[in-house]
Image (cartoon, rainbow, N blue to C red):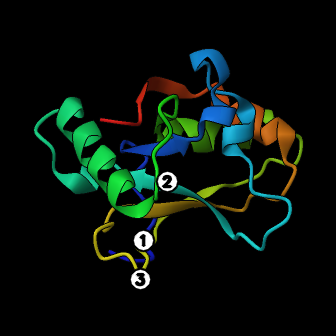
Amino acid sequence: MRGDNLPESDHIARYCKPTQAPDGQIQASAFMLKSDSDEKSLSVHWLEYLNGSSREHEISEIRNIYASIFRRVGAKAKIAVLNVGDVRGKVLTENEDRRNLEVIHDPKEDEPSDPSHSGIYNLKPDDELIAELILETVLEDYPARH
């Protein structure tokens, strides 16, 4: 439900633009807030919310969501899959300020085709170390385009 923390055992997907995955390798920049915006969270999608029968089905659904939201899904764009508990735990225990990230279900009202939208909160622009820690928790990656 909107505003709820995602379960630690669940998984999230992050869209990584082609510039954030040169040569097919996802970079830490994919997990940073834009420094020139007023973003409050890092946009992700809650995979278990989609009730897929398999990870492949969930990824297919995420690709459909991307196709409906973005004008163009880059040919070299990637989907990073992360575990909520791994992300939170890694940042909490391995960052000096012991940052407590929250991963919250946050569907956008203006995007009815995107009910799984969620956000990673308590990030700051230019949090390079935290972005590196999040990158270390990536479990799998997939092409973002069908």
| Callout 2 amino acid | Val
Mark closest to the chain's N terminus, 1 or 3:
1
Q: Position of residue 72 (x, y in %)?
A: 46, 50
Q: CA distance from mark 3 to mark 2?
A: 16 Å
Q: Cα distance, mark 1 to mark 3? A: 19 Å
Residue that carries the numbered disc 2 in the rendered image: 44
* In-front residue for pair 39/82: 39
Does dot 1 land on a helix, a strand or a loop?
Answer: loop
Q: Residue 120 or 144: which is nearer the viewer?
A: 144
Amino acid type shown at disc 1: Asp
Q: Which quadrant would the N terminus be assigned to in this image?
A: bottom left
Which residue matches tag 1? 4
Do tag 1 and tag 2 residues touch (Cβ < 8 Å)? Answer: no
| N-term-proximal mark, 1 vs 2 | 1
Label 3: how many residues lie within 10 Å, few (<14), some (14-19) or many (20+)? few
Q: Dot 1: few (<14), some (14–19), or many (≥20) neighbours within 10 Å? A: few
Front position among marks 1 and 3? 3
